[in-house]
Every structure is written in C-alpha cells, then in structure tokens.
Image: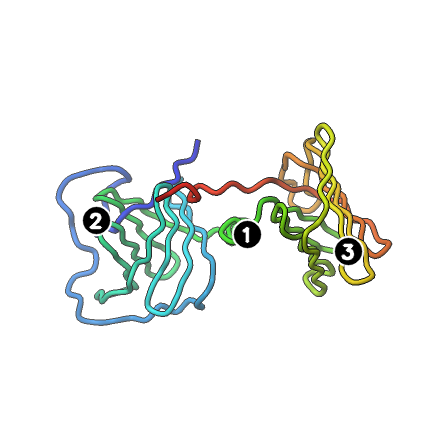
Amino acid sequence: MRCRVFVLLSLSLTACGSSGPVQSVFGDTADFHPDDRPLATTLVYDCNGFDFVARLGPGEMAVWLPDRYTVLSQVRSREGTLYEESDVSFWRKGDDGILTVAGQSHLNCQLQPHRVPWEDARRRGVDFRGVGNEPGWHLEIQAGRQLLFVSGYGAERTLVTEPVETCSGSVCVYSGASGSRELRVEIAEEPCVDTMSGQQFPFSVEVTFNNAHYQGCGRSLDYPWEDID
C-alpha cells in the first residue's frame, strides 16, 4: 500500500523516515524567489512513494495531508522556493522537491500531471468521475446534487442539477435534462480498461446525450480529509 504522508521540510538530504543531524540545503536565506508556477493550480506529487496534493495561491501553498489540511506560507531561501508552517514544509528547485513533516523527510518529489484531474475532482467534492475517448469526454457526479458532462475534448459542458438516481444490484442510472437535452448515465460495477491508456478501472460507464452514445470507465472518489476536525 502506498503511503500517503506529507512531511515538513527538515532541510535535510537524509532518506525517508531517517533521523539524525540535519544538514541545510538552503544556506543563508538572503533571497526571495517567487514561485514560477501558475496560481490556483492543483498539483499532485509523488515523493518516492509518498503522495500529496497541493494548490498554489499568492505567496502560499495549501496541502492536503492524511490527517489534516494546512496552508504553508512562502518564506525566504537561498535557492529554490520554500513553504513552511509549523511542522510542515515543502522546498522545490526545478522539477525536484523535498517534503517533510515532524522531522521526517521524503525526497525526489515529482509532479504527476496525469493524476491531477482526479485529485482536483476529489478536492472539489466529486463522488464519481468517468472518462472516455474518441472523442474525449469526462463525467463528474456529485451525488444528489449534479451531473457534469464535458464532451468534445472539453469544448462542450453540460450541467444537470438534481439528477434522478436509480440503482439495481451493481448498476446505477443517473438521468436528467439540461434545457431540452436529456442526459442519461449508466454505471456498472465491472472491470473496465481505458482504450487509450490501458488503465484499469472498477466501473464501466455508458453515457447517452443528445442522441449520441459514449463508452468509458470510471471510479468512485473518497475523501480522506472529510472527517478531520
């Protein structure tokens, strides 16, 4: 099982989970380097098997940890960019980063852009997400609230509020209308393989919209932070 730990930047180059003398990798904090990444962007990092999700704001970086949500402030560092708050901190230079929590450091933090749409949807409270190809489309379901169907490689967005949900056995159907156009989504709990990436999913998805049919795969999204005080 992959660890989902977010670590305070202990400013060390020790191995993950190691302890001992801390050797600074920053030197004097004489310079301030604004983060060059676009703001309001969801980021997913893999730090040698330790994952975390972040989102950038002006002079700050919000991070979602297994046991909490916290906002780090950007502070001065000799090189790279550094964010910290209490016992949590993150430093990056170029494509590499170090994440540390409570003195334990995780190195080689690398961006995972293919995971961003899924983690961004999770962060926004989406319960289920589906995807398909030729043409590219995706679906987001917020149970009891809305269906969002994005088709034509993102060119068309259709929102259905308060959809009707009907489940029987391992199959659930969601239906509703957007203006004069009907949207129907059938989700079956059965193995499904994405036709482009080869990625495996636990659900198959069939969408019927505006007299067109779309086939794809999907999975439910849980919320590891929803019960955090």
Q: Nearer the viewer, mark 1 or mark 2?
A: 1
List the single residue furthest toward the right: 211
Disc 3 marks a residue whose amino acid type is Ala
* Amino acid on which the number 1 mark rests in the picture: Ala
Q: For the residues carrying marks 2 and 3, which lies nearer the camera in this image?
A: 3
Q: Earlier in the sequence, mark 3 or mark 1?
A: 1
Disc 1 packing (10 Å; few <14; some 14–19; many ≥20): some
Q: Does dot 1 land on a helix, a strand or a loop?
A: helix
Residue 118, position as x, y percentages in the image: 55, 49
Q: Earlier in the sequence, mark 1 or mark 2?
A: 2
| Marks 3,1: beta carbons within 8 A | no
Q: Amino acid at mark 2?
A: Ser
Which is nearer the N-term, disc 2 or disc 3?
A: 2
Q: Residue at x 86, y 54 (%)?
A: 211
From what the image shows, is residue 34 above or below residue 204? below
Q: Which mark is residue 12?
A: 2
Q: Secondary structure at mark 3?
A: strand
Give the quarter of the image for residue 155.
bottom right
In the picture shown, does residue 73 fall above or below 205? below
Residue holding disc 1: 121
Q: CA distance from mark 3 to mark 1?
A: 22 Å
User: Which residue is depicted at the point 25% across and 56% down?
Assistant: 85
> Image check: 150 left or right of 30?
right
Q: Which mark is residue 43?
A: none
Helix, strand or loop at label 2? It is loop
Q: Quadrant of the N terminus?
A: top left
Q: Nearer the viewer, mark 3 or mark 1?
A: 3
